[in-house]
Image (spheres, helix red, strand yellow):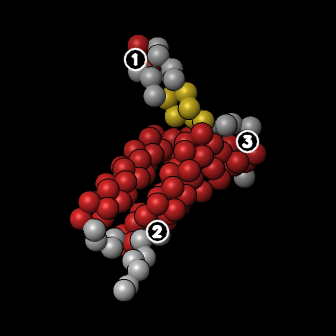
Amino acid sequence: MRDTMIDMMVMMMPLMKPFMWFAATVAILGLIFIIANIALKKDGQKATTWISRIVLIAAVFFLSAQAAGYFLNMPPTINFGDSSKFEFILVSFWQIGAAFLVASILLKLIGGSGKTAEA
């Protein structure tokens, strides 16, 4: 079973960088929604809530993948360097997951409190 899980992890590793960029794009989109809501004085709480949930799902995924990697004695990392030039800038999944967790919490706190007072 352990060999099967390691094989699955190796097969999924090329897909992790695009997934990370997708989640980062969604987090930036959430920030743009919050700025637009403030500038246009609109209530976009529902969209911001969904965006913060998507980023939270990505955070939980990366943190649980890190835990599974430690269990398999193969901690997962993403290379931000150019491997053809032998540049290796390795970032652990827990760091990416922690960044997404903080982004999700901030999106929820800033964008989720958009209740307007009615006079």
Quote the CA–CA distance across marks 2 and 1. Answer: 44 Å
Instruction: Kindly indicate whether the residue at mark 3 contacts the one at mark 1 (C-beta within 8 angstroms).
Output: no
Circle 2 is placed at which residue position? 112
User: Residue beneath label 1, please?
Assistant: 84
86 to 48, vertically: above or below: above
Secondary element under disc 1, as helix, strand or loop, is helix
As shown in the figure, which amino acid type bears the numbered disc 3?
Tyr
- Tell me the quarter of the image containing the C terminus: bottom left
**C-alpha gap between disc 2 and disc 3:** 34 Å
Above or below — where is 90 with respect to 106? Answer: above
In terms of secondary structure, where does tag 2 sit?
Answer: loop
Question: Residue 112: x percent and y percent?
Answer: 46, 68
Q: Where on the picture, by quarter, is residue 35?
A: bottom left
Q: Is 48 displayed left or right of 32 in the figure?
A: right
Q: Amino acid at mark 1?
A: Ser
User: What residue sits right under mark 3 in the picture?
Assistant: 70
Question: SS of the residue at dot 3?
Answer: helix
Q: Position of residue 47 (x, y in %)?
A: 36, 69
Of 117 and 1, the residue lying toward us: 117
Q: Position of residue 57 (x, y in %)?
A: 53, 61
Identify the residue at horizontal 51%, vertical 62% (top origin).
109
Q: Residue at x 45, y 28 (%)?
A: 80
Q: Residue at x 37, y 54 (%)?
A: 31
Considering every residue shown, the one lying at the far left of the view is 40
